[in-house]
Image: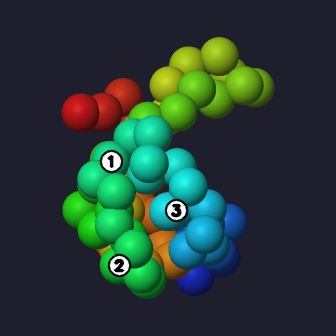
Amino acid sequence: MRPSRLRRIAINRAEIRKRCKLFGPIMEGARACRGGILREKNPHKGKERWAWFNGWDAVQEKKNAP
């Protein structure tokens, strides 16, 4: 994966922690929601987007998951 793509879908730790309280296990610290799954509506495309957190800043995005 190109670094530019990683940077584009990166989410800071606070955002990960906040979203994981809705979509995944509630954990404190940098490894919040490690291995958790984020599911959110894409307001522009009108469909759900699934993303797997690696536990840090980067998010691995998968379409039409799981």
Q: Nearer the viewer, residue 47 or 22?
A: 22
- Rendered residue at 56%/19% (across/down): 47
Q: CA distance from mark 1 to mark 2?
A: 12 Å
| Residue 38 visible at all | no
Q: Residues within 10 Å of mark 3 (few under 14, many from 20)?
A: many
The disc, 1 or 2, on the residue closer to the chain's N-terminal end is 1
Residue at the limit of the structure toward the top, as seen here? 46
Tell me if residue 7 comes above or below residue 22 in the rendering. below
Disc 3 designates what residue? 16
The disc, 2 or 3, on the residue closer to the chain's N-terminal end is 3
- The answer to whether 62 appears left or right of 15 in the picture is left
Q: CA distance from mark 2 to mark 3?
A: 9 Å
Q: Nearer the viewer, residue 1 or 34?
A: 34
Disc 2 designates what residue? 31
Q: Nearer the viewer, residue 54 or 21?
A: 21
Disc 1 designates what residue? 24
